[in-house]
Image (cartoon, rainbow, N blue to C red):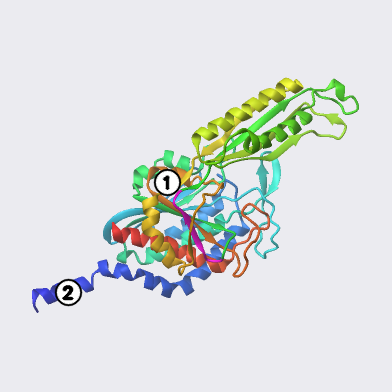
Amino acid sequence: MTPRFLALIIFFSSPFLIGKDLKVTLEKDLDALMPKVIAWRHNIHQYPELSNREYKTAKKVAEHLRSLDIPIETNIAYTGVVGIIEGAQPGPTVALRADMDALPVTEQTGLPYASKQRAKYLGQDVGVMHACGHDAHVAILMGVAEFLARNKKHMKGKVMLIFQPAEEGPPEGENGGAKMMLEEGIFDRYQPDVIFGLHVGNFEHGQIQVSRGPAMAAASAYRITIEGQQAHGSRPWLSIDPIMATAQLIEALNTVVSRRINIINNPAVISVGTVKAGTRNNIIPDKSEIMGTIRTFDPLLRAEIYDEIRQIGRGIAEGTGANVEVEFDVGGFYPVTFNNEALVDEYSRSLKAASGNNFLIAKNPRTGAEDFSYFSQQVPGIYFRLGVNKPGVEKQADNHSPFFTVDDNALDEGLKAMIYLALDYAEDH
């Protein structure tokens, strides 16, 4: 046998070459893998948990990873789980992230596996629902873990699996989410070279969308507390009415974006999400509170908005005699989610292939926000979206709605996309 012939045998039988064929293996394995992914999602959907309280979900994830002989670390940022799959060949470390928490929303989908869970949130008894699709994110990454763990002898490099708590924001007074996971050193310990994440949304079935550069807005929660003077509802002249002041505040807040700042080149959003005041119909209360969200892409514009809201608060206080306290970044702050442009340019091919070319480069950033932004500030990243409407349905209930649903048959494109990105990046580096 000649040395040249021997070299060819070694080359064509090596794990290096077999690694390129993992996509073919995945196609063969999908029929057996996807029913598991769907069953995991239904179970997680039926038993959702609020931020920093994802105990059962984290336990389910940890048990699954252990069953695959994946080394794991648990109790990161309260309930976070990290697993490391090490391939047989040298290569980079690719991080894949899924968020685990649900929302204080009472489900109204009527699904057989609909959530009936309840919890305390901001002092209220609330329903709990995976109204943002995080159940799909977790189930997809569990499927990714199973496929890669069973094929790691053909892999290059390492895959870091991040199951993250509290993406929707930790309870007030607690730390949490991606920021806390980083503070607890997960990137220092595992040193990923790149990170990828996905989010399901209400658009075309199986379509994958991605933006170059700024993809999602920075987000801040604000709270305005109005303290007045209580009186009987029949004698309002004896009161300093915080409800009247609150009404004026809300009306004035709606003029900040529409009338007070220039948003031609930098979009911005100010919304009011909660209004709390009073206990009885014939009592003018002594206190009210509003909370809402601010979305921006420019830190200078955000600072201008903060100043405008403070100015409005001072004006309402002077005009009504109430005491008005304005707070920003209540419960934390999310930076702009930025997609590395070079990565998007290079690995759009992976997303196209995974979606069967049902792929779109989105031209405009979204005013939604994501704490994936903390991860992609540390290493280059791509955060992409997966359409989970039923086939032929153009529009359905949006994320955070009590009617939001996920079509299970769209999840295989998400699983393939995460695996293709990991394999292709490892192959190229």
Q: Count all numbered tags in the image, as a single digit.
A: 2
Instruction: Pick out the residue farthest to the left.
Output: 2
- Report the disc number at residue 376: 1
| Left or right position of 102 against 145 | right
* Screen quadrant of the C terminus: bottom left
Q: For residue 69, say whether it is visible.
A: no
Quickly name the residue at label 2. 8
Quick one: quadrant of the N terminus? bottom left
Task: Out of 71 and 80, give the one closest to the viewer.
Answer: 80
Mark positioned earlier in the residue sequence (1 or 2): 2
Pointer 1 and pointer 2: residues touching (CB < 8 Å)?
A: no
Q: Position of residue 338 (x, y in %)?
A: 45, 46
Question: In which quarter of the view is residue 149 placed?
Answer: bottom left
Mark 2: secondary structure? helix
- x and y percent of residue 24 in the render? 37, 73
Q: Is residue 350 above or below residue 52?
A: below
Q: CA distance from mark 1 to mark 2?
A: 41 Å
Name of the residue lying farthest toward the bottom: 1
Q: Nearer the viewer, mark 1 or mark 2?
A: 1
Q: Per the image, is 22 magenta?
A: no
Tell me if mark 2 has few (under 14), some (14-19) or many (20+) residues whose alpha carbon lies within 10 angstroms of its own: few
Q: Amino acid at mark 2?
A: Leu
Above or below: residue 282 compared with residue 83: above
Using a 10 Å C-alpha cutoff, classify the residue at mark 1 as few (fewer than 14 neighbours), some (14 to 19) or many (20 or more): many
Choose top left, top right, bottom left or bottom right for residue 275: top right
The residue under the point 47% across, 56% down is: 210
Q: Quadrant of residue 326?
A: top right
- The magenta span reads 205-213
- Tag 1: amino acid: Ser
